[in-house]
Amino acid sequence: MENILKIVEEISGELDTLRKFIYDNPEIGFEEYKSSRAHIDLLEKHGFEVECPYLGCETSFKAVYDSKKEGRTISYLAEYDALPGIGHGCGHNILGASATGAGIVLSKLIDEIGGRVIVFGTAAEEVGGTKIELARSDELKDVDVAIEMHPGDINAVTPNSLALATRRFEFFGKTAHAADTPHEGVNALDAQIVLFSAINALRQQTKDGSRIHGIIKDGGKAANIIPDYTDSRFYARSPEKKYLLELLEKLEACAKGAALATGCEVKISEYEKGNDNTVRNLAFNEVLKEKMEIYFDEEVKDIELLTGSTDAGDISHEVPTLHGYFKIIEEGSPSHTVEFRDATMTDYAFDQMKKTIAAIVEVGIEILQNDEVYKKITDEFKESVKSGKIIPHK
């Protein structure tokens, strides 16, 4: 413990510079050129070999430190994209610094233990980013676990999260004068209205915790013209990936029924990348809670479900994954706000970040050294695959 804290303190000035630089230079998803470079420069300084661009993305990277000794591979997931208009209102400046910091600290210890540490720079979390591609690639086949800690209003181990999918429904009809010759038209707006009515009826028959929410982006051009084209966008969410796939089939059936009822043609597509639900690993959470309680004076909570979505969920369907939280602001304070953004720059947040780094380095060491704990984690993962709770991408 003392040795880990000592190394954290030794690099704390560099990590403080990193979080401040990224705060001062907010970049939205897939445009994080300065932010990714800041991470890469620091990791290379500490002996990591870095691949960038990565997975076809100019602002993603893979940084590897290899002890050259046999052992497991621990990965940390870094994010650094900002929100349009308010900058780092989700705290990715401090999230990324905690992941890179943990990778560097573990690299100072792993030569003696054996194994590898990887820091994945995962661009564009807010807009369907690199973790989705990472989960669908072969890049995780030699990775044993993935670890990410998000700033928040509480300290917490990994909750489950909702799987998310998107659908775009475009209806094509025929224009006509709405007063003079309406009988010659095929009304694409009617198709959207039927679609929304069908989805509203469907909601009663959906499982608890599922969500369907949508808007009409284009409902026509003028009230005196029968619309020949309309466009709607929907999000569908569910606590289970398996059930979300069933729900999508029902949504698409609603759209096809609306087209049939109105005489329109329909085009169905995915307009944004979705996310898999995070499937928390209880055995892995036990390790995280134990290590966090070494360093944190405040309570470490265990929340079963977070009613949002994250691309860390995609990773959790490939390898055992942690996506916990560390407190940087008063409980009850929402993220995606200027207040949350500014909280990332407080001394309290920085102290919490250092504690988080120490805790997740301890987690990494436990996985590297404790075969019994690692087996318990992987056995739970395999059982989740067998039961259909986890659905790998390949």
Image (tube, rainbow, N blue to C red):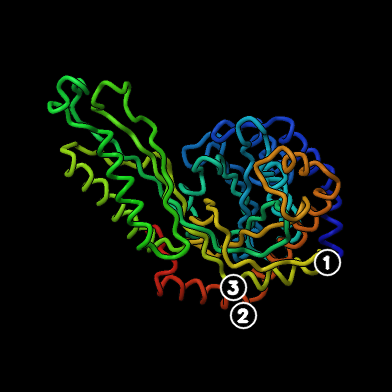
Per the image, label 1 sits on a secondary structure element best described as loop
Using the numbered discs, state the Cα–Cα distance from disc 3 to disc 2 in whole angstroms. Answer: 15 Å
In the rendered structure, find residue 282 and report the number of the disc placed on it: 3
Give percent across and percent down for residue 184: 12, 26
In the rendered structure, find residue 372 and report the number of the disc placed on it: 2
Give percent across and percent down for residue 172: 22, 32
Describe residue 149's horizontal placement relative to residue 384 as left or right.
right
The residue under label 1 is which amino acid type?
Met
Most extreme residue toward the front is 179
Most extreme residue toward the bottom is 372
Front residue of this view, candidates 94 and 49? 94
Using the numbered discs, state the Cα–Cα distance from disc 1 to disc 3 in whole angstroms. Answer: 24 Å
Most extreme residue toward the left is 184
Question: Which residue is painted at 80% across and 54% down in the image?
Answer: 352
In the rendered structure, find residue 1 and report the number of the disc placed on it: 1
The residue under label 2 is which amino acid type?
Glu
User: In which quarter of the view is residue 377 placed?
Assistant: bottom right
Describe residue 52's horizontal placement relative to residue 255 as left or right.
right
Badge count: 3
Q: Which is nearer the N-term, disc 1 or disc 3?
A: 1
Up-down relation of residue 260 to residue 118 (above or below): above
Question: Which residue is painted at 61% across and 51% down in the image?
Answer: 77
- Visible residue check, residue 236: yes
Q: Which is nearer the N-term, disc 3 or disc 2?
A: 3
Q: Which is nearer the N-term, disc 2 or disc 1?
A: 1
- Report the quarter where the N terminus lies: bottom right
The residue under label 3 is which amino acid type?
Leu
